[in-house]
Amino acid sequence: MEQIKRNILLNPGPSTTTDTVKYAQIVPDICPREKEFAGLMKSLREDLVKIVHGDLDKYTSVLFCGSGTINIDVCINSLLPEGKKVLVVNNGAYSTRAVEICEYYGIPHINLTFPVDQLPDLAVVEKVLQEYPDIALVHTTHNETGTGICNPIREIGALAHKYGAIFTVDTTSTYAMRPINIEEDNIDFCMASAQKGLMAFTGLSFVVGNRAIIEESKNYPKRSYYCNLYLQYSFFESTGEMHFTPPVQTIYATIQALKEYWEEGEQAKWARHTRVFNAINDGLEELGFKQVIKPEWRSGLVASAIYPDDDHWDFERVHDYCYERGFTIYPGKISTTNTFRLCALGAIDEQDIKDFFVVFKEALVKEGVQIPVIYKK
Ligand SMILES: *Cc1c(COP(=O)(O)O)cnc(C)c1O
């Protein structure tokens, strides 16, 4: 097996993969309608439930061909009964995406916004739930990848359930990294795609959730064809296959990635991501960079650093210098502050971050950026 050039991706997904996962895509051609392929998907679907410690009788996973956003679309459009409302607890770009999905479908919703650098105020969430008894679905994002803030999903889920609503959580940037327990975390539906925590590739996304609720949703308004959760679920249940052509190569890669996930182990993997994240924070701190989210609220996966007030700082130029040397850094996703992000996803470890900061510092020196970096206020 020839070694493939290793790039360190510090962007928020897709993430750096192992060569064994890359090579798992190279397989003899197969028609995905063969029994052999359906067999692969059965254990894959079960593994996806086990990652969040779900009981296989109560929870199931449903696969879709698409990037991670397809899951948000699927959950919002499929799980709302007639005449009811969605409540989006929104403190960032990814929850805003859920609001936009409501807008595109014309779904009645409440966009409950909080500042992007603050946790949602649970008392306000509860007040809205009390005030609007027609809220049937509460949605939020676990790790708001735009900033790296970690939302209190267990508490929001408890409130949703107290007022008779279901709880859907965008866990795309925590799943298979930060440990999740679907039942204890009060989640009815969570989601991810193969290119993030699982360290495989784009093209396969999945919703993990409560089987009884999916079955109940059979009679809910049908707002999409390709992205209807019940339709896809029932096809899986009756045939073991995806309704339409699956992303065959990505499925092979994901199966290998799952094998490597179980070999590394949930706790050890989370410890590795934490090591990487700590090394990112140490490196930023040493250079004097300020971050958007205060330490105790950080997800442990995304660092959001504020641009220094230095005329020599040019994100694009620093990016290009690092990129040419195998390190990818990423712009921020906040409209009010100029930020860039360094993420702890992927098959990387502490040493990769140390290597990165050598290159990053070189870039700053080359540009003439003052170190430690300066801020006017
Ligand atoms: C990456 C990500 C998504 C999905 O983005 P795609 O570009 O559609 O793959 C959704 N939610 C969160 C929180 C994410 O981090």
Image (cartoon, helix red, strand yellow):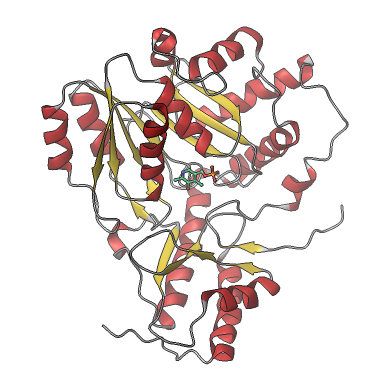
User: Residue 82 is drawn in which quadrant?
Assistant: top left
Residue at position x 53%, y 64% from top?
330
Residue nearer the viewer, 264 or 6: 6
Nearest the viewer among 108 and 351 is: 108
Q: Give percent across and percent down for residue 140.
A: 33, 39
x, y percent for residue 3: 82, 59
Vertical placement of residue 214 versus 113, above or below: above
Taking the spot 74% from the left edge, 31% from the top edge, the residue there is 248
Identify which residue is drawn at 17% across, 46% down: 121
As drawn, 358 above or below 186? below
Residue 75 drawn at (x, y percent): 43, 27
Q: Quadrant of the C terminus?
A: bottom left
Is 118 or 21 nearer to us in this picture? 118
Between 14 and 133, the one lying in front of the other is 133
Location of residue 296 (image quadrant) = bottom left
Q: Is residue 274 visible?
A: yes
Q: Is residue 181 visible?
A: no
| Number of callouts | 0
Where residue 184 appears, x then y in whole percent? 32, 32
For the point 39% across and 38% down, which residue is it?
A: 100
